[in-house]
Amino acid sequence: MDIDLTRNYFELFGFPESFAMDQKELVTRYRAFQSILHPDRYSGKSGQEQRIALQQTAFVNEAYSVLKSDLKRALYLLKLQDVDFDPDTETSRDTGFLMQQMELHEQVAAVDEAGDPAATLDELAVEFRQQQQGLISRFSEEFVQGNMEAAKDLALKLQFYERLTGQLKEKQEKLEDQLL
């Protein structure tokens, strides 16, 4: 099977360029690609055919990684719309949001001193997920309406919650390690 490496990730998986994504169908289509591109199918082929299959597998894996992640999918959609920004260096200009993020970072840092750190982590995880869902919903609305600057700002805000969630996971792992 030849996979066109110039197609965008949505085209590759046969989805419209939309933030809404049927995750179950994405997994089904990804597994179909995996079975077609499995290395065992290319073991008796030439070195060139094996390299091409490896390139195609890498492309499919990257596309799947992007489409399954809300944040990565949002950033990719903005890129497809030629929204110019660097998510690694740009931040939201919403000062109220930035202040809130500083407070949330402080709450995460202070978890160790809480009376019940595990319960505090669980509460923060629920709060962060609710905030993320709100941002995801708003991003989808703004993107559909063509408000790319607003969608960009929401994607940047979503990045903050991805980082906070990562910090929470680290804290949870450390707490679990301490309990063992």
Image: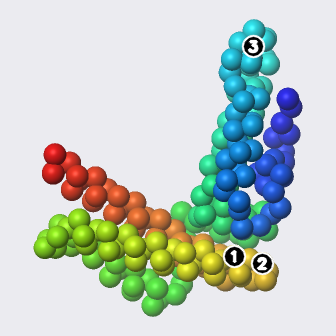
| Pointers 2 and 1 in contact (C-beta within 8 Å) | yes
The correct choice, above or below, for 89 with respect to 56 in the image is below
Whether residue 172 is visible: yes
Q: Please, what is the three-letter code of the amino acid marked with disc 1?
A: Ser
Foreground residue among 63 and 79 = 63
Residue for point 86% across, 39% down? 4
Residue for point 75% across, 13% down? 47
Mark 1 or 3: in front is 1
Q: Which residue is mark 1?
A: 140
Alpha carbon distance from label 2 to label 3:
45 Å
Alpha carbon distance from label 1 to label 3:
44 Å
Which residue sits furthest top?
44
134 relative to 18 in the view: left or right? left
Label annotation for residue 47: 3
Which residue sits furthest bottom?
96
Circle 1: element type: helix
Residue 71 coordinates in the image, percent (x, y) = 59, 64
Residue 119 coordinates in the image, percent (x, y) = 24, 70
Q: Quadrant of residue 88?
A: bottom right
Circle 2: element type: helix
Mark 2 or 3: in front is 2
Residue for point 48% across, 78% down? 131
Q: Please, what is the three-letter code of the amino acid marked with disc 2?
A: Val
56 relative to 69 in the view: left or right? right
Quarter of the figure with the N terminus: top right
Alpha carbon distance from label 2 to label 1:
6 Å
Foreground residue among 144 and 98 = 144
Whether residue 109 is visible: no
